[in-house]
Image: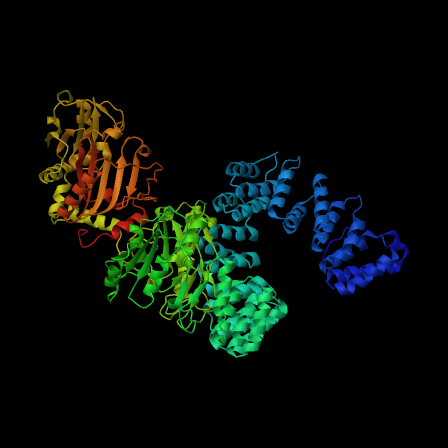
Amino acid sequence: MVRWRFWKSNSLTTIINPNFKHSRDEARRHYNEKNYDLAEPFLHKLLEIDGTDEWTLDVLSRLLMNTGRHEEAIPLLESLCLPGPDLSAYRHRLARSLQNADRIDESIDILKDMIFQSEIEDEGWELLSRGLKKQFKQDRVDLFWKELAESDVSSPHIDIEMIRIDLQASELTAAAHRIQRVTMLADDIQLSDKWKLKLVNVLLDENAPLIANQIIQGIPEKTPEYTKTLIKIKRALGDNDGAMETALAALGEKTDHGVMFAALRLAWDLGSMEDVVTYSEQIIVDKPRQRVAHRFRLRALVKIGDVERIESAVNATLESLPDFIEAHRVMIDIGFHEFEDWSFVIGHCKAILEIEPTDRRALCHLIHSQLRLGNFDEVNNLISKSTEIHPDNDEVDLTSAQAFWKMESGDHIQRINRMLARHELTSIHSVADNQNISVENLRCDAPPSPLTNQPLVTVIMTVYGRDEYLDVAIRSILDQTHQNIELIVVDDCSPDGAFEYLKERASSEPRLKAMQVEKNGGTYCAKNSAISVARGEYIAFMDSDDWTHPQRIERQLSAIQATPYRAVCHSYFRVNEFGDIFYKGVGAIRLACISLFAKRSVFEKIGFFDSMRVGADTEFIERIKATFGDDSVLHDPIPSMFMLNHSTSLTGGGRFQISWRSITGPRLEHHSSFKAWHKKIRHQDWTPYVAHPLRVRPYEIPAEMISGDIHWTKEMPLFSEYIQNRNERWWSSSQSAPWQGQLSEKSAGLLWVKQQGIQTPEILWSGDNLSEMPSLSDLPDRVVIKPSKGFSANNVLCLDNRVNVLDDIVWTDDRIQQQFSSDEFLKRVKPTWMVEEFLRPESWSEDEKIPRDWKFYCFGEEIALIHVVLRNSTVDKYANVHHYFSPDLRQFQRRICNSRPVPDDPLFFPQCWDEMVKKVKMLGKKLGCFMRIDMYATDKGPVFGEFTPTPEGGEGFTEWADRYLATFWEGEEGV
């Protein structure tokens, strides 16, 4: 029951006129029961008795607002806006009614006046924000808040809007100062939890979920709004498991539609379509006309439901929402692709056009359906009508072209050229007698670009088997108006003579390079092989059975050259061998992932395509956006790609086809998984780099999509397990270790390496009895004293004039004897003691205390990982710098050991690098097992340090490194 200010009061009118009291009682009763149609006549009767009665005006204005009659409520509210205790409340309601009546300027004026009168409440700020967005463009809205921020007015809402503006303008320092101010004590008033949640949602909208997560942790009250926001934060950070745990816990306690919507969207992210349907239907039960819930249910069912189930859901939706266009679209797709019932399709197209007479998709489907029924006169009328409504629409042009082709009017190419001209592309023609536009028949006489000194563009094409379309694809690239092209065609181990043919053709075409991979691995592994050798400043791609317009490369280059864009894609439409243009869903035209044209720097930063059978190009493009920002990839909607549509295509047919249902099954699982990883790239500094070959995938994909056979799988042991097993076998077992195990003793390793002709430190003295070591006064000023067994740098002294350069402690003969003779580990292993020369670093790094230690993780002669250590201290481990490199000398941008961060500063390779690698590979080959081989970069060149068969004792590796190194291990000893 609503509580009114005048609930128990009796006005003079009430006392004098008993009918007034009766009418008011009846009005109150019906209003509280929400029987507005019964309450309204009594309220009007009350106004006839007393037109100024505040209670009557108040209740009637509320009734009119509740029934959507805001224009009628406005004069009543204006009469209530008189000085008094309720003036602010009435003005808020007046502003709301004005806004709902689309008199937004008047609403804003009232709210602005209330700001400067210090009358505005939270509701008013929200009304103002909503009204500004409705009335003005974003730059004018931002100017309003900036002007308000410069005034004397102070409000958390102004601060939050300014934080949004600062973040959008990348004014991060200003935003940080405001965030700090509004989340801490200011003027002895702490920001309320409600305002903190508003701030958190602004931060989420502006792509700052990490900061949002920090702030929300300080909100103690766990309201449904808090839970919904926390789920959104976890989704944004890619923590889908954590988000679902939060959602299920909240829904287990109490059903809240806001939380349920958050769970629904999360289930969509996860690809859990049955859960999407379940949550949607739970919301629809309570809110039968909730359009978003209906939309999610239909979209989920399209991906997983059988036709009968989808039909049932569509009918239920249309019963509640007769004007819901998307439900009709679903039925059009079913009728078009499943039933091939053209009258059925026409019925739903007409239903849409009754709601939205200019709907382009309905018009195009209507043309296609009438065409199949042979109603050519109706088709021509619809083409004229659609062209008049949408004179510059590519879909209308392609639909018309298909209709003209099937009606044999001879105008189909003219209609395609109409579309191409709109995009400033030269017209095409067909060499076929019947003007078939299948890709092998297409020609274009675009003249070469007049520009000179243009950059080299590498175009990569993969081939599996030679067919009639291979030459079509090659010719369409070599005929590009941009002539400075390197075309690399990679044969993926074709079973026929495709590679021999490519080599023969390349012998007479200097711009064509033919190469073949060692093992069939699918198109993306083949593409990666070509990326590794590409010379171009830009890299583009092409399929071996398509035709691309000769101006494509020229237009793509001009679109991103000297711009912040990192890549550009064009659009495509499909044509089959019979010249038919393929149409489904939203239309014929789609983003052409294969048309990707990217700057070389993109590949240097994010690496290669994922090693998959299908779908890796979509992931790669989205990874560019996750790394460089959503605006880094330009989708220039030029339809430059004419793609062949045939049943053997990975997208056009087979188990991975993309049907009218869009992506489903394994492709859907893949999308859900890589999107979660990309969020971690965006917000948690995860590296975007994907190596080739790919040994450890940073996210999970369905097994049937995986290509290649050297990736880590859950069934494989970890590297740490191999090392710990070796540690037990070599050092703890009663059986003797293999011959390589004897070399882990430092003196034995040094002797063996020296016999291989590799330089080692000069041994000044060695012996089993430390007490027999020469006095420091009898040794050179620079010496290293160490045991032949051990794993700790604390037991190694690097003395320069008796000062250990790693801890600045001065050592004497007595201190050495006392320190090492009391060490329990050394007493147990009884090592040989060694005094060797203290090597000097290369001249370019002579300011370093000791030579850098280059540690090669070798599996035979194959180098898997290089760990470079600059030791500065045994006291402060954070002073030591650790770099880790891949075999192709790229620094890993992820932790290898949990306790060692990735350094910011780059590392230069030593002058003796080539010689060092040569010697390491020679040693690795002779050892024939896994071994970490340590080398020093010195002023004498590369010098051997020691063998380490069990690095780090098999402990401390990150999960990624543990998996990565495990993929190299074969057999018992690693090779």
Left or right of residue 645, residue 854 in this image? left
Q: Quadrant of the N terminus?
A: bottom right
Left or right of 358 in this view: 698: left
Q: Residue at x 37, y 71 (%)?
A: 647
User: What residue occupies the far left of the structure in this picture?
Assistant: 755
| Residue 322 image position (x, y, % from top left) | 62, 70
The answer, for residue 656, to whether it is visible in the render is no
* On screen, residue 585 above or below 936: below
User: Which corner quadrant of the image does residue 121 belong to?
Assistant: top right
Vertical relation: 943 (above or below) 711? above
Above or below — where is 845 with respect to 326? above
Of residues 696 and 912, which is closer to you in this image?
Answer: 912
Viewer-closest of 925 and 66:
925
Q: Quadrant of residue 32?
A: bottom right
Can you give x and y, in whole percent of width and height, for residue 595 in the image? 40, 57
Q: Residue reaching furthest top? A: 777
The picture places residue 358, in percent across and down from the top left corner, at 60, 66
